[in-house]
Image: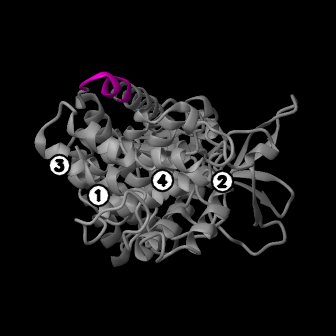
Amino acid sequence: MTNGRDRIESLGAGLVKALYQTIRAVRIHRDNNQLIKDSATTLHGAIVELARSGGVTLQVWRGRFHIQGEKLLFRRETCHLIRELSEFFGQRGLGGLVFHETFTAASPEGLVAFVRMLDESARNGDPAAWLETRVADSGFTWVETVRKQEETPRDLEVQRRERARKAYFNALAAVREVAEKASKGVAGVRKTRRLAQSIVDLVREDKSLLLGLATIRDYDDYTYTHSVNVALLATCLGRYIGLSNTSLEYLTVCALFHDLGKVGVSKSILLKQGELSDSEWMVMKSHPLIGVRKILRLHAPQTLRSRIILGPFEHHLNPDLSGYPKTRFMKKQSLLGRILKIADVYEALTSERVYRPRSFTPDEALRRMWKEKGRSFDPLLLKSFVNMMGIYPVGSLVELDTGEVAVVMDYPEGSGPELPMVLVLVEDGKGGLAPGDLVNLAARDDTPSQKRIVRGVHPSRYGIEPSRFFLQETGVSPGL
């Protein structure tokens, strides 16, 4: 399944690039020009290759292209042309194109004629209607134009959002179930392992969506919510540094169970306000060892248990092996343990805790962690984590220089760590905030109206949970 997505992504990127080049060529050359012929041949070949599976569907939604339902990732080399093509489709009232299976019989010359129609349609009052008529009159039965949907379509993007939501809450239920069973006896991990595989797949598809979900806060069920959030953060980091799918699955399971040992710690200690006594602190520091004992008793293959023990044992250790629990048999911290340490601390810093007056904003947490690089965190991994998250991490609430507040939704490839895509929030007429325009701050035009981030702000100031904007369908325009 993963290889299929990689193939579609690669071929889709080639298709979009060839379409962009063909559009540019028809604007300045006649049909007999060699550049047009070469561009059309490349575009024709890209469509034919994809059409072998039964046709090609190209959709444009919220400024992103979807090929065969798979979101085309922003890459540095394609970022600018995706933006321009998105505007091109928007100006013509188009939401996409469908090349039918019969396209294999179409000629490159016919494709050039169709691209000219695409380009010329903008000169008419109703471009989409004009284009539909011209395509029908030309007998181009191998292509279908799709009008832009004013309402958010229930397409695969929405389904992916729903899959992510279900994966999150199913993981939450699975961790709770394993913890409760482990406290009484032996627990199985089959369900958790399937969920880990789903999370790995979702991270490959849409990292920003899962980072947004990692801002969910349930303070009545904090231990389990924390474990799932750490799993999302850790898996995203593992994917960012290039771990294999198998290693990512082990990392995800590791993270989901990293605090399993807390089932052996009294709630009076876990939920105590203020500082712990020396004896209470000794009990708290025992939870990694308790967790190892629980994992060893899991009803799971020996190979799985051996792969997921070290991370939970090490997630409170520092690179020099200071921290807890004290150990004499280890010479260095494992890679999974170092990843879990970063994800665990970041999630804890950005969450409200009984022993701390307030949580840190995501950018504050990253700055605080950066000061501890080398001593508390692997410096190279922490640098990767900061680069992955951006200056204002996905899920951050930020204030713009216009006085508006916005939620950081994504960092398009090539946008830079300080230029995310943000969802501007507007008053909902009921004293709250609702989704407004989705604005790509990387699409800079250096005009006085260009929005810029001034600072990160705490969500509690506005009484909102940023995660809800990733859980619900916003139905906003691209705003690019």
Which residue, given by chain and number where applicable, does mark 2 sit on? 396
Instruction: Kindly report the distance in space between the C-alpha atoms of the residues bearing marks 4 and 1.
Output: 38 Å
Q: Residue at x 37, y 48 (%)?
A: 288
Q: Earlier in the sequence, mark 1 or mark 3?
A: 1
Instruction: Kindly report the distance in space between the C-alpha atoms of the residues bearing marks 3 and 2.
Output: 36 Å
Question: For the image shown, how many numbered marks are present on the structure?
Answer: 4
Which quarter of the rendered picture does the N terminus lie within?
Answer: top left
Crowdedness near tag 1: few (<14), some (14–19) or many (≥20) residues, C-alpha within 10 Å: some
Give the farthest residue toward the left.
302
Magenta residues span 179-186
Tag 2, which secondary structure?
A: loop
Which residue, given by chain and number where applicable, does mark 3 sit on? 306
Q: Nearer the viewer, mark 1 or mark 2?
A: 2
Which residue, given by chain and number where applicable, does mark 4 sit on? 344
Q: Earlier in the sequence, mark 1 or mark 2?
A: 1
Q: Nearer the viewer, mark 4 or mark 1?
A: 4
